[in-house]
Amino acid sequence: MINEYQNIKVIGFDADDTLWVNETYFRDAETEFSKLLSRFETENKIDKELFNMEIKNLPVYGYGVKGFVLSMVELALELSNNTVSNNTISKILEIGKEMINKPVELLNGVEDVLKELSKNYKLIVATKGDLLDQERKLKKSGLLDYFHHIEVLSDKKEENYSRLLKHLDIKPEHFLMIGNSLKSDVLPLVALGAKAIHIPFHTTWAHEEVTVNPNKHKSYRTLENLSEVISILH
Amino acid sequence: MINEYQNIKVIGFDADDTLWVNETYFRDAETEFSKLLSRFETENKIDKELFNMEIKNLPVYGYGVKGFVLSMVELALELSNNTVSNNTISKILEIGKEMINKPVELLNGVEDVLKELSKNYKLIVATKGDLLDQERKLKKSGLLDYFHHIEVLSDKKEENYSRLLKHLDIKPEHFLMIGNSLKSDVLPLVALGAKAIHIPFHTTWAHEEVTVNPNKHKSYRTLENLSEVISILH
């Protein structure tokens, strides 16, 4: 039997929610924010409005904690009709700083998998978000030595991956991407002719959710956790 | 006579205040901010406190407009003893969005110089700041096609440049860096054994200012504007 991954030479990893916990911290922050503003609106409504504000501001602020905090401040002013207390604004800034200073919590088995794969493959990280945040998390993670290259992308669309592969001189058929987001880590790679493995995290940001046509030939694989990658590649 | 630049194969350019105007917009924003808060403190004092707040937050927020805005909000709360109006906070957020959406204003002669140099050298951009901001400015600038590679660094210290040169497979003796900051664009390169040209911009952020020992052998050159680079390299 031919292993469909036999041509793979380079493996790319998403970082947030693939190597370590991230989305959980955003969910916690959203809950805290909703509670702070609960005298102005229902928590459910606040949650929805925050998502809308983030999407509205995404072209200006991009991904990452800083833009998220700025969106929370803007929404606090708006939802409260400019009556929110300075104290609440101050707490919102604190939420952001706490998120940025959170320790990095590796997902189960990540280090073992990287150790094993690094024997036979070149490993890279391809992540989006804030450059400083991502570099800091990689340093804190203790995983830096497993990777040949770290790329922080401003977005993860087909063109971003295409440019990255070209720049690193990697042919799509030699590349396998592993990540928790179908939209950002899987579908653009499949479109480019590379391989992709989807490992869902229990929480996904609504903006990363996509509807996949179930009748379309599924050209990627979904696994429950990263450790399964080892047996599939061998 | 031997041209000291005869071994140069790759030229790196800083972006903000080397290719286009940037610091001026920060200065304008600071002035606007000081005016907004002038009922709490003298404008001079506010200016100093804003610098201190930025430096305090630099390890958390890094460089770029978003961290700058978050620092302004934090300082507004602090300076006003939590009595600043929601309207003022809202205006601070607006200052940030306006900065991000500013058109890119190229410095004199930039495009001609890049056109000329790109005939004989590989050109790259090495800039620090916010990834999305810098990518957006490069796109708006219309200069993208002149560059072989764009690198947005989280900082511009010797180790950052060292990693960049290694990654791009460039020997220090083949590399010339051009930029407006002695601290960020010149001294780390000289330390690495690369060449550097300093082209001061009329405004420098205090954090970028360094004291250079005048007795030390000056191993970089200072020019008044980018166009002079052409005659020096030929």
Image: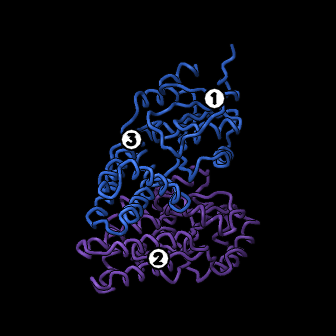
Chain colours: A blue, B purple
First in sequence: mark 3 vs mark 1: 3
- For the residue pair B234 and B167, the one nearer the viewer reads as B167
The residue under the point 67% across, 33% down is A174
Question: What subunit carries mark 2?
Answer: B
Residue A119 appears at what percent x and percent y?
A: 53, 27
Category of crowding for the residue at label 2, using alpha-carbon neighbours closer than 10 angstroms: few (below 14), some (14–19), many (at least 20): some
What residue is pinned by disc 3?
Answer: A24
Closer to the eye: label 2 or 3: 3
Q: Amino acid at mark 3?
A: Thr
Q: Which element carries disc 1, helix, strand or loop?
A: loop
The amino acid on which the numbered mark 2 sits, given as a three-letter code, is: Phe
Q: Chain of mark 3?
A: A
Report the Cα–Cα distance between label 3 and label 1. 26 Å
Three-letter amino acid code at the position of disc 1: Tyr
As drawn, the label of residue A220 is: 1
Are discs 3 and 1 located on one and the same chain? yes
Is residue B45 placed above or below B178 in the rendered structure? below
Is the Cβ of the residue at disc 3 closer than 8 Å to that at disc 1? no
Left or right of residue B81, residue A70 in this image = right
Q: Residue at x 47, y 36 (%)?
A: A18
Q: Is residue A222 left or right of residue A70?
A: right
Residue ID at (41%, 68%): B69
Q: Quadrant of residue A110?
A: top left
> Element at badge 2?
helix
> Alpha-carbon distance for marks 2 and 3?
35 Å
Tell me the chain of label 1.
A
User: For the residues marked 1 and 2, what is the alpha-carbon distance in whole angstroms?
Assistant: 47 Å
Q: Secondary structure at mark 3?
A: helix
